Structure formats: structure tokens, C-alpha cells
Image: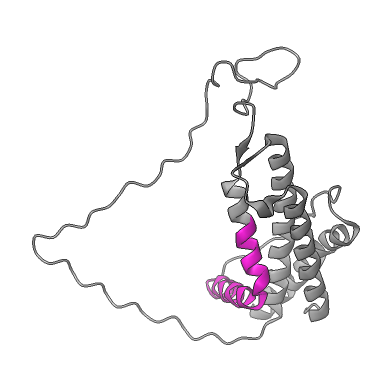
Amino acid sequence: MSVDRSFLSMGLEVAERALTDLVARDNLHLRPEKMPRTRRGKANGRLKQIEQIVRRLLTLMALSLHIVFAPPRKRAQAPGLPEGVELVTFPAVADPCFALLPRAGGPFPSGPVMDTFGTSYGPQGPVPTARLLARIRAIRRVLKSPDSAAKRLAHSLQRLKASGEPRPMAGHAHSAFRLSPELGALSTALPGLLTASLEATWEESG
């Protein structure tokens, strides 16, 4: 099953307009270093919805492509290190730990009664925007060249099928409460379209 190209192009345009609106709503085009925690939370939520929609549109584009990829080349074995030379490795950044006991003085929003073992959301005040801005830049790069992204995704899907992996699953659409009517309709329609395309593609390969 293939989806009409005009539908996919329209969907990407709608997603790009939603991204522009998100940026303008909080003046993120000015690249602020910090913003209020509540506003960043709402922006993160809207951006997550846009990311999911774009990812599903690109998957539909990838499934509609008929590309024959060359088999992967065998990588040449890396030459050994000269005698007396050692390879220095740097430790990776440690994952953040789960806070068993929140910081003293922080808010504990677990109900009307103070609870030391509730979840702490950190200190009040503005919070950094670096990660949010990085995600916005990343999705903008994809929206500028969706065909290239779809080809890369098609290659990944081909590898999954060739290795006998089960087909990817498309979950239900999230609530469209904060989305525009156009984007909400698109978000609601995509899971069914994507599931049908994936089923048809995996059946053909089987």
C-alpha cells in the first residue's frame, strides 16, 4: 500500500507550520538561554507531537520508495597499533541517577501534604533551553530535505526485513488537544495509514 505523495507533502508542510508556530510562541528564534519551566514543558510536549508526526510521515515516504540498495561492503580490518602505542579511551558521561531522596527545600508535588519521597521537579525559576533548541534544529534539518531522510529510513527498514525482524508497530495517536485542526486530523489518520503500509510491505517481503 502506498500513500499519495501530495498527502505526504501536505503533511510535512502542516508540520513545518506547526514548528514555526511553536518557535514564535515562545520567541525561541531569539535563542534564549533560559525560559520558564512551565513554558518549556508545554513546548517540549508540542514538539514531541510534531516529531512523532514527522517521523510517521517519513516512514510512509520510505515505504513508498522502490530503491535497490547495494549489499553492504565488508569493512577492511583496522591495522594494529605500532609497538609501544596504547589506545586511550575516555569514560562516557554517566547517566543521571534516580534521586532516592530529593534535595531538601525542593517542591514535592505529591498532594496537599508535604512528602519527602515525592518526585522533585528541581528548583523554581527559569530552566535551560539548549536541549529544546537542539531538537528544533534537528527536525528543521529533516524538514529541509525529507527525501534524503526517507531514503536513509528506507535503507534501515530494508535491513530490518532482510534480517527477519518483526515489522515496526505504529501506536495510537496522542491527544490532539493542543494541535491545530489540520495537524490534529493528520495525527489521527497517520497510525492507520502507517499500519496498513507496514503490513503490506512486510507481507510482500515474506
Quick one: 205 or 60, which is closer to the camera? 60
Question: Which residue is drawn at the image coordinates 66% and 86% (left, top)?
Answer: 66
Q: Which image quarter: residue 159?
A: bottom right
Q: How is the image coloured?
A: one colour
Question: Which residue is drawn at the image coordinates 87% and 56% (left, top)?
Answer: 180
**Residue 188: image location, x then y, percent:** 85, 59
Question: Which residue is drawn at the image coordinates 56% and 72% (left, top)?
Answer: 156
Say if 46 sits above or below 165 in the image: above
**Residue 52: image location, x then y, percent:** 71, 58
Name the side, left or right, on which 29 lies relative to 98.
right
Furthest residue in direction front, as rendered: 30
**Does residue 24 show up?**
yes
Quick one: 131 or 57, which is closer to the camera? 131
Quick one: 100 or 90, which is closer to the camera? 90
Write down the region rendered in magenta: 136-163
**Does residue 4 show up?**
no
Q: Which image quarter: residue 41?
A: top right
Inspect the magenta stretch and tell me whether residue 143 lies in it. yes
Question: Which residue is drawn at the image coordinates 48% and 37% (left, top)?
Answer: 96
Inspect the magenta stretch and tell me whether residue 183 lies in it. no
Secondary structure mostly seen in the magenta stretch = helix
Quick one: 172 or 179, which is closer to the camera? 179
| Quadrant into which the C terminus falls | bottom right
